[in-house]
Image (cartoon, grey):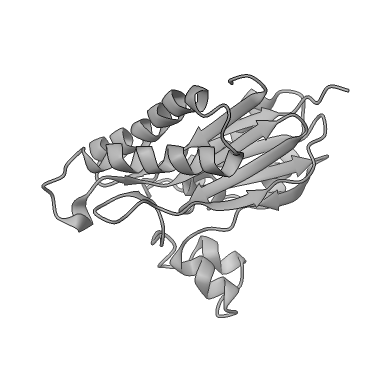
């Protein structure tokens, strides 16, 4: 939090366990460093500058490795400013907005299967089990140029709204309504922990990061 702005950010690292974890941490560190410096920047410019700086820091992890072995991470942001919120992302980590046990909106993945869904070749439910589901089309890191974030305003923020940022290790084995229902209760932390445990149980034998953060909005006035 800095001034009237509160930023939540999550990354799901790729490129081997240690390099992937380091890539995600460099995203978090870049957000912490640049949020205070960007107090006067427009929201989209602030988030893009964080992503670009994180991208450069991730490129320094293992610069001599071939591009396909480079450390990478997805990135998803939720920037609150008063009664408004802005999502931004690169990759297949998601941001959700829930209200009263229902999903209002979510980001759309940068992935091969999302493109197949948007072109009508598979159903939305097929995304969760398709053999190409782990192939992302946009991320931070690698030898390429700065990544382009996709920006999507959340709905008008009301007190009690729940915002969830999560990796595919959470959303893939569960469903949107299940997450919306379970996160509407008063104990948000325990509900999120239960969802994560359930996701890991469903994916037993299939190693994947299950990373998530949730926040309940309180709007004054």
Q: Residue furthest front?
A: 40
In the picture, measured across the screen, residue 174 lies left or right of residue 208, that is right
Quadrant in the picture for the N terminus: top right
In the picture, measured across the screen, residue 191 lies left or right of residue 38, that is right
At which x and y percent is residue 118? 59, 73
Residue drawn 57% across the image and 78% down it: 119
At which x and y percent is residue 58? 28, 40
At which x and y percent is residue 65? 13, 49
Tally the numbered discs.
0
Residue drawn 58% across the image and 29% down it: 40
Residue drawn 63% across the image and 38% down it: 164
In the image, 42 versus 10, the foreground residue is 42
Q: Residue furthest right?
A: 221
In the image, 49 versus 183, the foreground residue is 49
Q: Is residue 125 visible?
A: yes
Q: Quadrant of residue 220?
A: top right
Vertical order, 198 against 70 (above or below)? above
Q: Quadrant of residue 112?
A: bottom left
Q: Residue furthest left?
A: 64
At which x and y percent is residue 101? 79, 42
Residue drawn 69% across the image and 38% down it: 85
């Amino acid at each position: 939090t800095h001034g009237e702005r509160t930023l939540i950010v999550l990354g799901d690292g790729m490129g081997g366990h240690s390099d992937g974890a380091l890539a995600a941490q460099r995203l978090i560190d870049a957000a912490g460093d640049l949020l205070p410096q960007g107090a006067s920047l427009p929201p989209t410019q602030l988030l893009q500058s964080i992503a670009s700086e994180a991208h450069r820091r991730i490129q320094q992890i293992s610069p001599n490795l071939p591009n396909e072995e480079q450390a990478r991470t997805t990135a998803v942001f939720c920037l609150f400013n008063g009664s408004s919120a802005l999502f931004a992302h690169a990759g297949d980590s998601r941001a959700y907005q829930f209200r009263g046990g229902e999903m209002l909106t979510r980001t759309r993945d940068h992935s091969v299967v999302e493109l197949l869904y948007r072109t009508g070749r598979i159903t939305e439910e097929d995304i969760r089990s398709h053999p190409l589901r782990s192939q992302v089309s946009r991320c931070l890191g690698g030898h390429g140029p700065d990544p382009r974030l996709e920006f999507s305003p959340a709905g008008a923020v009301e007190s009690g709204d729940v915002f969830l940022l999560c990796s595919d290790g959470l959303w893939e084995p569960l469903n949107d309504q299940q997450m919306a229902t379970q996160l509407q209760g008063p104990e948000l932390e325990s509900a999120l922990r239960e969802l994560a445990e359930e996701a890991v149980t469903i994916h037993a034998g299939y190693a994947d990061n299950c990373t998530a953060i949730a926040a309940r909005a309180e709007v004054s006035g």
